[in-house]
């Protein structure tokens, strides 16, 4: 199982939990291999070149699957190139600042950023990752253009969060499922979560909507995808097995302990969810001027 991101992010943690349970169900080894690079592109391209025999699969995630293709018009894969097999889990995004930050509410943060956006920095992953379009819509509702902020690129969510802790960036929006220990230790402070309801893991953290701001509604997810041409019987077996795990208290407990929830969808439902998510992301990236193409230095030229 390819994970197109570094270790210790929510996709990696979910893949390792999934692999342990699949091994017990199938009595065969399920190896997780991290193939990080370019915000998930390196691992995705490796999957697309794999034999469609069900032995090489990938745990996909929101940023690399739909958000990056919406932002980068020259990305070497399209959102629908990996074959959707089964959605596994979902996790809200949380806007976080350093634990000892002077900002204690989302409104305080945005008010400060609004006065001098260029002096504030956010972290991104490769082309952008799951948070960029979500942050762009949130900032827009607060009268701020995302393009006016400074941006620093890191490899994976863990590195993005570490940059907030050590002061290289001012804030981040990452999966709740990959920051539990950092929130519990006080190294990070969550100001708001995405979606229309608070998370069970952090019930005291309000939604952005409760803070009077729109647009921060993206829910991250993980799901298994395969190479093109995968036989329908293989797809069905993977989907059915993960469907059984979705009813297994032990597996559900591991996913919920991360701050995520089990969010099973079969192949057809997963494909439709991806299509809708991509269309929203493409419309947002185009409207806000965030869609572009790579230049010779590997950066994204807008417009």
Image (cartoon, rainbow, N blue to C red):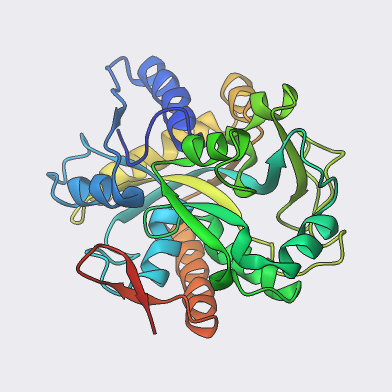
Q: Is residue 30 above or below residue 37?
A: above
| Nearer to us in this view, 243 or 48 | 48
The image quadrant of residue 240 is top left
Could you tell me residue 161's position as x and y percent? 56, 38
Q: Is residue 14 above or below residue 50?
A: above
The image quadrant of residue 233 is top left
Could you tell me residue 110's position as x and y percent? 77, 62
Question: Is the C terminus in the top left, top right, bottom left or bottom right quadrant?
Answer: bottom left
User: Which residue is found at the position 68% from the left and 47% from the top?
Assistant: 94
Q: Is residue 258 above or below residue 288?
A: above
Question: Is the N terminus in the top left, top right, bottom left or bottom right quadrant?
Answer: top left
Residue 15 falls left or right of residue 56: right
The image quadrant of residue 19 is top left
User: Which residue is found at the position 76% from the left and 72% from the top?
Assistant: 142
Residue 204 falls left or right of residue 4: right
Could you tell me residue 246's position as x and y percent? 56, 34
């Amino acid at each position: 199982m390819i994970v197109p991101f570094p270790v210790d992010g929510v996709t990696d943690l979910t893949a390792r939990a999934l692999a342990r349970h699949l091994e017990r169900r199938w009595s065969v080894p399920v190896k997780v291999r991290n193939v990080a690079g370019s915000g998930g592109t390196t691992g995705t391209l490796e999957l697309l070149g794999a034999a469609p025999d069900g032995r090489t699969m990938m745990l996909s995630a929101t940023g690399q699957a739909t958000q990056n293709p919406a932002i980068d018009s020259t990305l070497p894969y399209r959102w629908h190139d990996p074959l959707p097999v089964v959605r596994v889990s979902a996790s809200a995004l949380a806007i976080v600042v350093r634990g000892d930050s002077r900002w204690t509410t989302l409104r305080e943060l945005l008010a400060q950023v609004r006065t001098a956006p260029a002096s504030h920095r956010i972290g991104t992953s490769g082309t952008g990752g799951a948070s960029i379009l979500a942050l762009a819509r949130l900032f827009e509702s607060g009268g701020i253009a995302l393009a006016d902020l400074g941006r620093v690129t890191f490899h994976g969510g863990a590195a993005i969060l570490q940059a907030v802790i050590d002061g290289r960036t001012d804030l981040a929006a990452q999966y709740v499922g990959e920051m539990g220990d950092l929130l519990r230790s006080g190294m990070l402070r969550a100001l708001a979560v995405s979606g229309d309801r608070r998370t069970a893991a952090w019930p005291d953290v309000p939604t952005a909507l409760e803070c009077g701001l729109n647009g921060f509604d993206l829910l991250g997810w993980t799901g298994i995808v395969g190479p093109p041409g995968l036989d329908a019987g293989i797809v069905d077996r993977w989907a059915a097995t993960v469907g059984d795990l979705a009813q297994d208290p032990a597996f559900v407990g591991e996913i919920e302990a991360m701050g995520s929830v089990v969010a099973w969808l079969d192949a057809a439902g997963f494909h439709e969810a991806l299509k809708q998510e991509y269309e929203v992301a493409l419309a947002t990236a185009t409207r806000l001027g965030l869609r572009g193409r790579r230049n010779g230095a590997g950066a994204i030229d807008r417009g």
